[in-house]
């Protein structure tokens, strides 16, 4: 099978069917059942508890989007026990069967893509374009990882060397056991999928713990995978407060986490201090875009705007710093300010909306705090800076801050709200030095028409994903099978990026097998 990225909206536009795209999405929006209750899934059991989460939608906080169960830890332990027991047989399953299940799941995801996109909009506030792109990314993960397993024939390889004539040696990659999957709110379908599928497809079993803000996408993913053939006992789902997770780490063989650096480091230290075990972590970024004097400003404005303010800066890959060479600094700021002032902010269910709500009240308060801090420390608000007062939706203005002293901690703090810090620099070399002067190393970008400048960035930047002249998002938008996504330094752990050729290896360990005739 040849892998091809899904690209739904792009395909509709190319086929001159854009209106059909909008009708399909809006039809799905109108059919979403609000206020539905979702159980915990442990093996064959669907469990409801007396303690509940009432999940409001950031699109309209007067609406209850879903009701989920609030576990106290008992069901998480049960789910891990069931998953560990199922590993006894799942680890021996034929890799060809696992590939078939992945392809079936991809087909079901494709069939329900508009429904899933509508769920994402209600759940975390993404506009229709970003929501459908997340579903596409999820489908891509299933197709790409299944193809990887096929191409590597289950990661069973006969070795070329031989010491004795009667010797046959093999390298076989084997699963570890049961994994706890801890997923974030910002990509509740795609990121949950890459971690869950990475473990399951390689013969491990899983318990999925979604963000309490976005539990429904993960529920849909788990049910789709089960219907596609993955065993009920091998893929479980538990909604539980994050602070109750730590005790469960003793009982699993691996864990995969995407979220903040501080939480990830705390979990990792607890996990490996007790005994050496694998972990797959993606821990955010403080991503820089560099605009040189040789840049095409049209591309630079478009790419920086989308990278900084797409989904309200709530992406670990979001452009949060821009370093601009002096000859074009003033013109760049003038034109970027004009672009930002035209941003359509509001209800993400509407076709024209670019920037919908940020995720919750805590994010609103964080935005206020960071803007206030920037001003108190000497920065100037070029554009934006306000919370849009509306009791029913969490809206803020995309914000550009200039002249902030480099001594400010904001230059090195992951903000996760739509705030872009811009600094004038004298050279590319200075810009790269500043870009590297953070603990993170996830993504970076450059705008320049000089191939030598681009190569200099690629050679010297400390980041796992790097773009040149990307108008779709100067530091954002990595797609499976195209841009393997993962970070250096504090932004990652394994060095094997999601959606890339080595990712599945993070969930397996090597066994050398030798037979003598």
Image (spheres, helix red, strand yellow):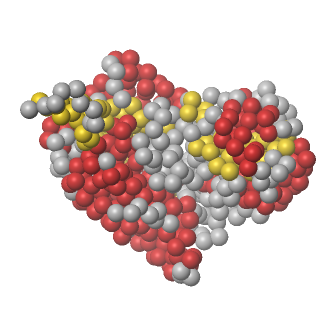
Give the residue furthest to the front: 165
Give the position of the C terminus as an image quadrant: top left
What residue is drawn where x is 56% and y is 77%? Answer: 14
Give the image location of residue 383, x and y in percent.
Answer: 81, 51
What residue is drawn where x is 61% and y is 42%? Answer: 443
Q: As drawn, is 313 to the left or to the right of 512?
A: right
What residue is drawn where x is 53% and y is 70%? Answer: 9
- Residue closer to the observer: 408 or 169: 169
Does residue 160 appear in this view?
A: yes
Above or below 462: residue 357: below
Give the image location of residue 396, x and y in percent.
Answer: 69, 52
Above or below 471: residue 28: below
- Residue closer to the observer: 368 or 516: 516
Give the image location of residue 256, x and y in percent.
Answer: 39, 37
Q: As drawn, is 515 to the left or to the right of 506?
A: left
What residue is drawn where x is 89% and y is 43%? Answer: 326
Q: As drawn, is 242 to the left or to the right of 416?
A: left
Above or below 459: residue 232: below
Above or below 168: residue 64: below
Give the image location of residue 292, x and y in percent.
Answer: 81, 47
- Residue closer to the observer: 417 or 169: 169
Give the position of the N terminus as an image quadrant: bottom left
């Amino acid at each position: 099978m040849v892998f091809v990225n899904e690209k739904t909206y792009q395909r509709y536009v190319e086929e001159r069917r854009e209106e059909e795209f909008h009708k399909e999405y809006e039809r799905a929006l109108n059919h979403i059942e609000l206020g539905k209750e979702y159980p915990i899934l442990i093996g064959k059991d669907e469990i409801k508890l007396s303690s509940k989460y009432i999940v409001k939608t950031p699109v309209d906080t007067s609406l209850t989007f879903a009701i989920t169960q609030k576990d106290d830890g008992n069901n998480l332990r049960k789910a891990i026990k069931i998953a560990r027991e199922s590993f006894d047989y799942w680890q021996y399953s034929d890799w060809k069967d696992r590939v078939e299940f992945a392809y079936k799941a991809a087909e079901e995801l494709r069939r329900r893509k508009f429904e899933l996109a509508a769920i994402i909009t209600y759940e975390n506030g993404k506009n229709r374009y970003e929501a459908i792109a997340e579903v596409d990314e999820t489908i891509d993960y299933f197709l790409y990882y299944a193809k990887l397993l096929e191409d590597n024939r289950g990661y069973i390889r006969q070795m070329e060397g031989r010491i004795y004539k009667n010797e046959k040696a093999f390298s076989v990659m084997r699963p570890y056991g049961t994994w706890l999957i801890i997923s974030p709110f910002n990509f509740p379908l795609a990121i949950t999928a890459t971690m869950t599928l990475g473990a399951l497809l390689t013969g491990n079993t899983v318990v999925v713990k979604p963000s309490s803000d976005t539990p429904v996408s993960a529920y849909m993913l788990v049910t789709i995978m089960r219907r596609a053939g993955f065993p009920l006992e091998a893929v479980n789902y538990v909604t539980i407060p994050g602070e109750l997770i730590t005790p469960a780490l003793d009982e699993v063989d691996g864990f995969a986490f995407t979220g903040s650096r501080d939480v990830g480091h705390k979990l990792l230290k607890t996990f490996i201090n007790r005994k050496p075990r694998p972990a797959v972590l993606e821990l955010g970024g403080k991503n820089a875009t560099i605009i040189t004097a040789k840049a095409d400003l049209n591309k630079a404005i478009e790419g920086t705007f989308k990278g900084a303010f797409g989904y309200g800066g709530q992406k670990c890959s979001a452009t949060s710093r821009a370093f601009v060479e002096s000859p074009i600094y003033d013109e760049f700021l003038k034109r970027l300010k004009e672009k930002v002032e035209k941003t359509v902010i509001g209800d993400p269910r509407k076709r024209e909306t670019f920037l919908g709500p940020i995720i919750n009240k805590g994010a609103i308060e964080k935005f206020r705090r960071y803007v206030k801090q920037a001003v108190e420390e000497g920065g100037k608000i070029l554009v934006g800076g306000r919370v849009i007062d509306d009791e029913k939706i969490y809206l803020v203005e995309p914000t550009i801050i200039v002249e902030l002293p480099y001594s400010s901690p904001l230059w090195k703090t992951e903000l996760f709200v739509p705030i872009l810090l811009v600094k004038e620099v004298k050279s590319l070399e200075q810009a790269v030095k500043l870009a590297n002067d953070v603990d993170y190393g996830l993504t970076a970008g450059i705008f320049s028409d000089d191939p030598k400048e681009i190569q200099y960035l690629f050679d010297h930047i400390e980041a796992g994903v790097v773009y040149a002249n990307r108008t779709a998002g100067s530091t954002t938008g990595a797609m499976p099978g195209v841009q393997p996504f993962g970070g250096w330094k504090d932004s990652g752990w394994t060095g094997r990026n999601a959606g890339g050729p080595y990712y599945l290896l993070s969930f397996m360990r090597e066994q050398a097998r030798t037979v003598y005739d």
